Amino acid sequence: MSVLIILILVSLVVALFFLAAFFWSVKSGQYEDDYTPSIRMLFDDKKPTPKKTKEPKL
């Protein structure tokens, strides 16, 4: 029975940690820009420049 109490206490500590991390991220502005991620997929990616290979000398 004591193991059950320990597991409940540990789960409450973990839940409080994640709740505090969520409030910290909201307060620091992590979720402020909700427009840019939704339109990011509409823009083309920059095409990589082809690498120049040296031709072997004969």
Image (cartoon, grey):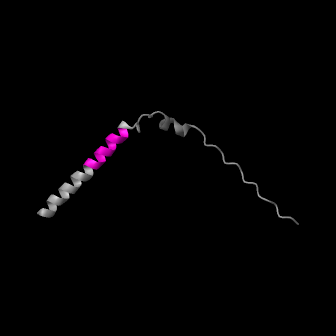
- Residue lying at 49% horizontally and 35% vertically, measured from the top left: 36
| Quadrant in which the C terminus appears | bottom right
In terms of image quadrants, where is residue 53? bottom right
In terms of image quadrants, where is residue 26? top left
Please state which of residues 21 and 52 is positioned toward the viewer in this rendering: 21
Q: Is residue 25 left or right of residue 16?
A: right
* Image height of 26 relative to 56, above or below: above
Q: Position of residue 23 (x, y in %)?
A: 32, 40
Q: Residue furthest right?
A: 58
- Residue lying at 33% horizontally and 43% vertically, measured from the top left: 22
- Magenta-colored stretch includes residue 21: yes
Q: Is residue 38 left or right of residue 10?
A: right
Q: Is residue 12 left or right of residue 42?
A: left
- Residue lying at 42% horizontally and 34% vertically, measured from the top left: 32
Identify the magenta region: 16-26
| Quadrant in which the N terminus appears | bottom left
- Residue lying at 30% horizontally and 48% vertically, measured from the top left: 18
Q: Is residue 58 left or right of residue 28?
A: right
Please state which of residues 38 and 24 is positioned toward the viewer in this rendering: 24
Q: Position of residue 19 (x, y in %)?
A: 28, 45
Q: Main secondary structure of the magenta part?
A: helix
Query: Total marks drawn?
Result: 0
* Image height of 35 relative to 49, above or below: above
Q: Residue furthest left?
A: 1
* Image height of 35 relative to 16, above or below: above
- Magenta-colored stretch includes residue 23: yes
In terms of image quadrants, where is residue 33? top left
Please state which of residues 4 and 9 is positioned toward the viewer in this rendering: 9
